[in-house]
Amino acid sequence: MKPNVKIGSFLMAVVMIFSVLIVSGCTPMSLNKEWSYKSGDKELAIGVYIYSLDTAYQKAKSFAEKLDDYDETKDSWLEMEITDDDGKKEVASKWIKDQAKLMCLSYLVLDEQIEKEKVDISKDTIASADEQAETYWNVGQYADYGYVMPMKNDLEPYGISLESFRYCSTEYSVKYQALFDKLYKEGGSKEVTNEELTKYFNDNYTDYSYFSVNLYTSSTDEAGQSTNVAMSDKEAKKVTDEIDGYVKDVNGGKSYDDVLKAYMKANEIESDPSTSNIENLENSSLGDEVKEAIKKLDNKKAAAVKVGSGENAVYYFVYKRNIKDAAKDYLADENNSANVLSSMKGEEFADYIEELTKSLDYEENTSVINQYEPKMFFVPVEPTTSAEESSDSSAKE
């Protein structure tokens, strides 16, 4: 949130595992039945506030860990000045409480707007979400992989009930998306036309392919330990010269597909070694060197880029297509078009929700809220032996 952390990015990142869920519309009740904030007939349980406080605490902790004098064995960082993702500086404990309040107001705003815009959410979606939320609560999100870690074990001791957890995570996540769709899709008050979406896609997305070759050899010993050894200059040059030749072929007019086939044939590779994708490079997980090389390319051109050095060096062949050629088919897919729309209007929508919190008519149960402080979530990490010895040595000096 601005000037703090956007609800649309901050909270949604925390609950991203619930991205396709929603829960019933009942008002959650906390374990001790107290309320925290209310607006009109909507009342938030104190568990909702505690969950928000915990969420903000975890985010603030990630900022504090970047400080030179951060000490994980003490809660003193809560009184240190942190800098959030938007560059705002604030004492950690105050930042946490401000964010928790803002999240609660955003919940109320979302409920208000869902009613105002007459957003309809199917019963099947609600039922599916109820089931999923309870699964996470009872066995955790990794149970399918054999790791049973019930979320209730972490949340219930603080006074957060299943209802509050569900309301803050699954319900918020999908209601947020449902309202976004209502406003920005066809017929909405902020409708984005197909022409506008296509223009944004063409201006911000990239259609690319790449494959890579290691400039080192790997071996594994009897103990299973892998070791990389850098190629000799002669060996590395043979590899880079080959890739440079393919780059020259593409830039000279040969098709990417033909060049890829030639590379695979020359190196007796049966499975396609390349990776192809269409995405906004600003949000890409590609390494910076590869990303920048792709950005600099003209359409239907290729380049080679070396990443790393010595026993970690890798040589990349990168190719860029004309994004306009992919627009029609890509945006015809409902999931793709939804993702592009989210990229286009996500920040604007987050700002819109935040702006509505400023004019929200609400009540705060201050005496109850003040019973909960960020430090309640602090769990000290025991110092290592070396750290203890260093501390003892310093004390003796």
Image (cartoon, rainbow, N blue to C red):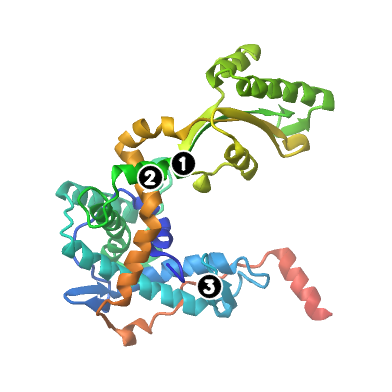
> Is 115 above or below relative to 91?
above
State whether residue 365 appears in this view.
Answer: yes
The mark lying in front, picked from 1 and 3, is: 1
Residue 112 location (% of width, % of height):
21, 68
User: Between marks 2 and 1, how big is the CA–CA gap?
Assistant: 9 Å
For label 2, the SS is: helix
Kindly identify which residue carries mark 1: 205
Quadrant in which the C terminus appears? bottom right
Kindly identify which residue carries mark 2: 340
In the displayed image of the protein, which residue is found farthest to the bottom? 367
Kindly identify which residue carries mark 3: 88
Task: Say if mark 1 contacts mark 3, CB within 8 Å.
Answer: no
Task: Say if mark 3 contacts mark 2, CB within 8 Å.
Answer: no
State whether residue 50 appears in this view.
Answer: no
Q: Which three-letter amino acid code belongs to the residue tagged 2?
A: Val
Task: Say if mark 2 contacts mark 1, CB within 8 Å.
Answer: yes
Q: Is 220 left or right of 333, judged from the image as shown?
A: right
